[in-house]
Image (cartoon, rainbow, N blue to C red):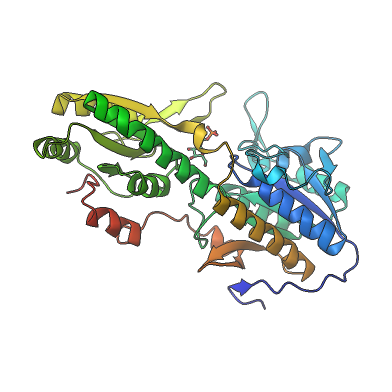
C-alpha cells in the first residue's frame, strides 16, 4: 500500500508504450498550459508515450465523436508555458452526474463520459482541476475503472493538503499589483479605495495580496467582521494624518447586515460578486469619506503565469506522469514543504482548505496592525 505522502521516484523510462488522456476542468487559471507542456514533455519525450488532450473537460468526452487531439512536442513547445488560459479549453458546468438538459431537467450522463474514455482507449487519465472537478472525476474513475491522477489548480488555493495550487500565485500577484495601482490614486484624491477579489469561500487571495499590497483593512469570509470597526479604523487613520485608506475584501464576505452577495448570470448560474459596492456605500455613509470600488474579477485568472506557477505546474506535470509509470493511481500531486509529493485523492477532497485564523498570515496581518474587521 502506498504511503500517505510520497516523493517522486523518477524511474528510468523503459516501459511499454502507453496512451494518456489529459483534460483541464473547472475555471481556468494561469499555469494550465505549463501543466500541459510538462505532461506532454515527460510522457512523449521521457517515456515515448502518446498523449490525447481532451477538449473542454468532461464535455469533450460527452460529444461524439469524442473531442480530442493528440498532443506532441510540436503543439507543446516551450512557448505555451508562458500563455494564460488552457489550449484544451475547460468548463465549470456540465457535471455528468447531474447534467442540465436543454429543458432544464437534470440527467445522469456519467456512463456516456465513461464510454467516451473507453473509446479513446487510454491507459490512464490526468485531470487538472479543483476539488469540485476531482469529486466528479474520482467518481467517474471509480465507476468506470479509469486509472486517474489529479493535478490541483485553482486561483482560490482551497484544495486540501497542497500548499499551492496552480494559478494561485499569479492571482495574488495580479491583486497585489492592483493595490499598487490603487494606492497613488487613493492618495491623490483623499479616497477610500475598496478592492474586491475572487477566492470563492476562501480568503487566501485577499489575505496574501492584502498584506503584500499594503492594505489597511482586509476582510475575508473566515473572520466575521463588524462594519463599525471598519469605519473606526478609517477614522483612526485619518486622525493619524492619513488621507486615504486601502480596503481588500474577498468576494464571499457577507454584507454588513448578513447574507452572501451574489451575481445572477444569464442561464441561471450565480457567482459571488458585489460585496465591494455594498461596503463602499455603507463606509461612505458611516465615515463621510469618498469611496471608490474596483472589482478585479477574471483579470486574476488570465495573463502570463508567474515563475512560481510555471514551476509548480512543471513539477506537478512531471510527477503525475511518473506516478502513472509506476502504476500508482487515485492520487493527487501536491506541493508540501518545498517538494512535489502525492497524496490520496480522497484526502485532497475531504475538506476545502480555508484560511487558518491562527495561521502565519493571519498573525502577520495582525502584527502589522492591519484591521481584519473583528477588533
Ligand atoms: O474558482 C475560481 C473562481 O474564479 C472563483 O474565485 C470565482 O468565484 C468563480 O471561479 C467565478 O466563476 P465563473 O468563471 O463562472 O465566473
Relative to 59, say whether 209 is above or below: below
Q: Quadrant of the N terminus?
A: bottom right
Q: Position of residue 96 (x, y in %)?
A: 68, 41
Identity of the residue furthest to the right in this view: 16
Identity of the residue furthest to the left in this view: 239
Q: Position of residue 286 (x, y in %)?
A: 15, 28
Relative placement, left or right, of 2 versus 347 is: right
Q: Position of residue 248 (x, y in %)?
A: 32, 39
Camera-side residue of 264 and 79: 79
Camera-side residue of 125 and 298: 298
Relative to 65, say whether 146 is above or below: below
Q: Is residue 123 visible?
A: no
Camera-side residue of 307 and 13: 307
Q: Position of residue 345 (x, y in %)?
A: 61, 62
Residue at 69% across, 57% down: 317
Relative placement, left or right, of 44 versus 137 is: right
Residue 256: image quadrant is top left
Q: Is residue 314 visible?
A: yes
Residue at 20% across, 48% down: 374
Identity of the residue furthest to the top in this view: 266
Disc tally is 0
Residue at 90% across, 62% down: 17
Relative to 27, say whether 309 is above or below: below
Relative placement, left or right, of 207 versus 242 is: right
Residue at 25% across, 42% down: 216
Relative to 176, say whether 330 is above or below: below
Amino acid at each position: 500500500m502506498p504511503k500517505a505522502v510520497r516523493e517522486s521516484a523518477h524511474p528510468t523510462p523503459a516501459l511499454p508504450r502507453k496512451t494518456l488522456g489529459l483534460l483541464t476542468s473547472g475555471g481556468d487559471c494561469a499555469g494550465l498550459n505549463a501543466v500541459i507542456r510538462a505532461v506532454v514533455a515527460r510522457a512523449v519525450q521521457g517515456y515515448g508515450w502518446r498523449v490525447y488532450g481532451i477538449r473542454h473537460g468532461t464535455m469533450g468526452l460527452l460529444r461524439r465523436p469524442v473531442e480530442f487531439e493528440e498532443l506532441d512536442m510540436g503543439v507543446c513547445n516551450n512557448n505555451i508555458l508562458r500563455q494564460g488560459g488552457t489550449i484544451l479549453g475547460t468548463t465549470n458546468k456540465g457535471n455528468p452526474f447531474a447534467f442540465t438538459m436543454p429543458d432544464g431537467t437534470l440527467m445522469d450522463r456519467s456512463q456516456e463520459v465513461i464510454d467516451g474514455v473507453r473509446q479513446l482507449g487510454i491507459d490512464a487519465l490526468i485531470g487538472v482541476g479543483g476539488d469540485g472537478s476531482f469529486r466528479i472525476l474520482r467518481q467517474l474513475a471509480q465507476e468506470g475503472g479509469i486509472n486517474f491522477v489529479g493535478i490541483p489548480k485553482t486561483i482560490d488555493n482551497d484544495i486540501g493538503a497542497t500548499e499551492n495550487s496552480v494559478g494561485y500565485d499569479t492571482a495574488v500577484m495580479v491583486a497585489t499589483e492592483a493595490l499598487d495601482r490603487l494606492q497613488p490614486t487613493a492618495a491623490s484624491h483623499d479616497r477610500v479605495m475598496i478592492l474586491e477579489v475572487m477566492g470563492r469561500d476562501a480568503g487566501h487571495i485577499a489575505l496574501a495580496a492584502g498584506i503584500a499590497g499594503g492594505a489597511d483593512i482586509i476582510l475575508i469570509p473566515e473572520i466575521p467582521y463588524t462594519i463599525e470597526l471598519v469605519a473606526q479604523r478609517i477614522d483612526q487613520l485619518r486622525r493619524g494624518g492619513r488621507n486615504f485608506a486601502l480596503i481588500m475584501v474577498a468576494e464571499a464576505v457577507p454584507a454588513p447586515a448578513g447574507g452572501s452577495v451574489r451575481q445572477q448570470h444569464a442561464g441561471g448560474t450565480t457567482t459571488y460578486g458585489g460585496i465591494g459596492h455594498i461596503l463602499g456605500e455603507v463606509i461612505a455613509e458611516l465615515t463621510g469619506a469618498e469611496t471608490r470600488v474596483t472589482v478585479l474579477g477574471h483579470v486574476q485568472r488570465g495573463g502570463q503565469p508567474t515563475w512560481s506557477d510555471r514551476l509548480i505546474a512543471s513539477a506537478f506535470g512531471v510527477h503525475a506522469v511518473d506516478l502513472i509509470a509506476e502504476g500508482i493511481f487515485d492520487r493527487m500531486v501536491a506541493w508540501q514543504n518545498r517538494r512535489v509529493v502525492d497524496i490520496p485523492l480522497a484526502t485532497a477532497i475531504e475538506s476545502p482548505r480555508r484560511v487558518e485564523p491562527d495561521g502565519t498570515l493571519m498573525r502577520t496581518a495582525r502584527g502589522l496592525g492591519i484591521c481584519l474587521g473583528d477588533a
